[in-house]
Image (cartoon, grey):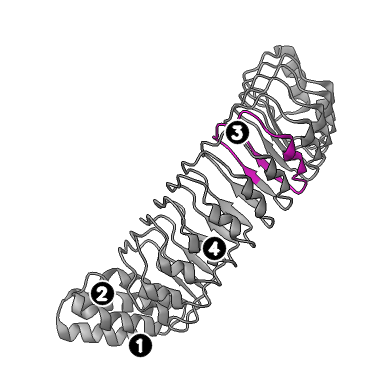
Amino acid sequence: MKNTDAHTQKIKQLLESNEEANFELALQLIKSVSSDNEGTGMLAEVFEIITETKQKRIACLQNGVYAALRNNTALNFSELHMEQLLPGVGKLTELQHLYLGHNKLANLPNDLAQLAHLKTLDLNVNQFRQIPLSITQLTRLEQLLMNYNSLESLPENFKKLTNLKVLQLYQNQLKDFPLVITELPHLEVLWLGANVFSTLPAEISLLQQLKDLSLYNVPIQNIPQQVGRLSNLRELSMKYNQLHILPSEIGSLWRLIALEVDHNHIDKVPESIENLRKLEYLSLRNNQLKSITGGIGQLQNLKSLHLDNNQLTELPEEIGKLKNLEVLSVENNQLKAVPPALYQLDKLKTFNLRDNQIPLKKISEVHRQYPLIQV
């Protein structure tokens, strides 16, 4: 590691001297670096300086860097403040994973399309306003991460990415749900939170392999019935939306493990929720619920139940059937009593009863049963 640090400092000194002879020495040192992990890390640091050298030198220098990296299958050029990725990256024909997050990139070189084996492309936290053409030609790509950019839409040829399994576009400026996404047959993870579209189309049901759908903080007012056809879905997050109704079709998502519908305007939980027998995490915080269906007692795998900041006046006796429940939080409701059935929950570790209307004597009884109670 010490040798790597020494090489890094030497190369930086040679490049910053701005003398032709020293530039040639730096180039030779870059070419001599082995392409192991430590060498890759060193070259990533040097990349910052490359873009600051005189334009006439860049082509020569980039060839030296890419030559040293030609056998790498993974490269991490994150957090280097880069405004451009130097052309020549297409020569890295063995590359499978490329990490360019937390830079200042707004475009990519055309020869990126030559990375025929690329599976992962991380472009999180950059300045992209549109999808570069070269990305749509990466037909073996399995993961595309572009959270925290400024994308307003996706191009029609995005559907060429037929092997894509993970697509993360959180915190962009998508004005409409990109229908082209529904033509990605192998998609398993889709994050579209913190965008500005207001309608979730029925075509979402075409994503039959989808396992994780996040629509956090999107101004959606309705969930289409067709969502119930996403039979492989394991995680569904629809927090901070504008939902008034949770459709009964939600009960068809029988493989669901986690359901988050916090911070909406929902006043009723559908009876069909009892069909979610694999559910382990259910959160309905900050809604307008006045009661909870007794069918919730059928959720035998439920471990965490969060009902804070609603208008509940009672909890159903059936809640005592949740034998695997470890966390129950009902803070800031209008509860006046605790159902005796709660004392049957042997695995309960945390019980949050703060800000309700339960008499102190009753709270003391519960506290004896559950020392971790929060009041």
Q: Percent from the top left, x then y, of residue 298?
A: 83, 36
Badge nearest the viewer, 1 or 3: 3
Q: Are marks 1 and 3 in contact (CB under 8 Å)?
A: no
Q: Which residue is mark 2?
A: 12
Which label was assigned to residue 262? 3
Q: Secondary structure at mark 4?
A: helix
Q: Residue at x 65, y 32 (%)?
A: 284
Badge nearest the viewer, 3 or 4: 4
Quadrant in the rendering for residue 311: top right
* Depth order, front residue of 261/208: 208
Q: Secondary structure at mark 3?
A: loop
Q: Is residue 202 left or right of residue 195?
A: right
Can I make out residue 229 in this image?
A: yes
* Depth order, front residue of 214/352: 214
Quadrant of image for the C terminus: top right
Q: Percent from the top left, x then y, of residue 302?
A: 76, 40
Give the amino acid at mark 4.
Lys
Separation of residues labelled 4 and 2 (CA atoms): 43 Å
Upstream in sequence: badge 1 or badge 4? 1
Q: Is residue 166 left or right of residue 21?
A: right
Badge nearest the viewer, 1 or 4: 4
Mark 3 neighbour class, 10 Å CA radius: few under 14, some 14 to 19, many 20 or more: many
Separation of residues labelled 1 and 2 (CA atoms): 15 Å
Badge nearest the viewer, 4 or 2: 4
Q: Percent from the top left, x then y, of residue 279?
A: 75, 43
Q: Which residue is mark 1?
A: 32
Separation of residues labelled 3 and 4 (CA atoms): 32 Å
Q: Are marks 1 and 2 in contact (CB under 8 Å)?
A: no
Q: Which residue is mark 4?
A: 159
Give the amino acid at mark 1.
Ser
